[in-house]
Amino acid sequence: MQRIPDDYLSLIAQLMEDLGGEELLEFVPLEFAERCQEVLESLGITEVNFQNVWDIFQALLPLVF
């Protein structure tokens, strides 16, 4: 494993902040993400994986919209 120098990490952190901070990693509005999370929790899903992700999406879709 290669260690990243601290000055590089601080430069990366500053660049990320300049570009929008944590919002840079958000792909949907916060309200929509919260609604999806509420619906997912209401379904009692304990694990999302490649085998069940499509079934979960199909269950979520009509409940979110």
Image: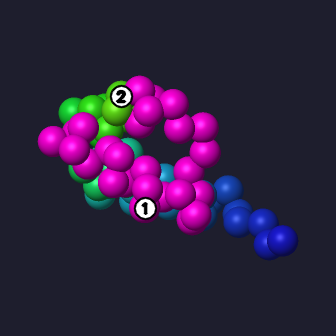
Residue that protrudes farthest toward the right in the picture: 1
| Side of 32 where 14 appears, left or right | right
Picture disc at residue 54 = 1
Say which label, 1 or 2, has the lower sequence index. Answer: 2
Residue that protrudes farthest toward the left in the picture: 65
Task: Characterize the local packing of mark 1: few (<14), some (14-19) or many (20 or more) Cα atoms within 10 angstroms.
Answer: few
| Residues drawn in magenta | 40-65
For badge 1, the amino acid type reads: Trp
Identify the residue shown where x is 53% and y is 57%.
52
Label 1–label 2 contact, CB within 8 A: no
| Side of 57 where 28 appears, left or right | left
Picture disc at residue 38 = 2
As helix, strand or loop, the secondary structure at mark 2 comes to: helix
Q: Nearer the viewer, mark 1 or mark 2?
A: 1
As for residue 51 lying within the magenta part, the answer is yes
- In the image, 22 versus 16, the foreground residue is 22
As for residue 43 lying within the magenta part, the answer is yes
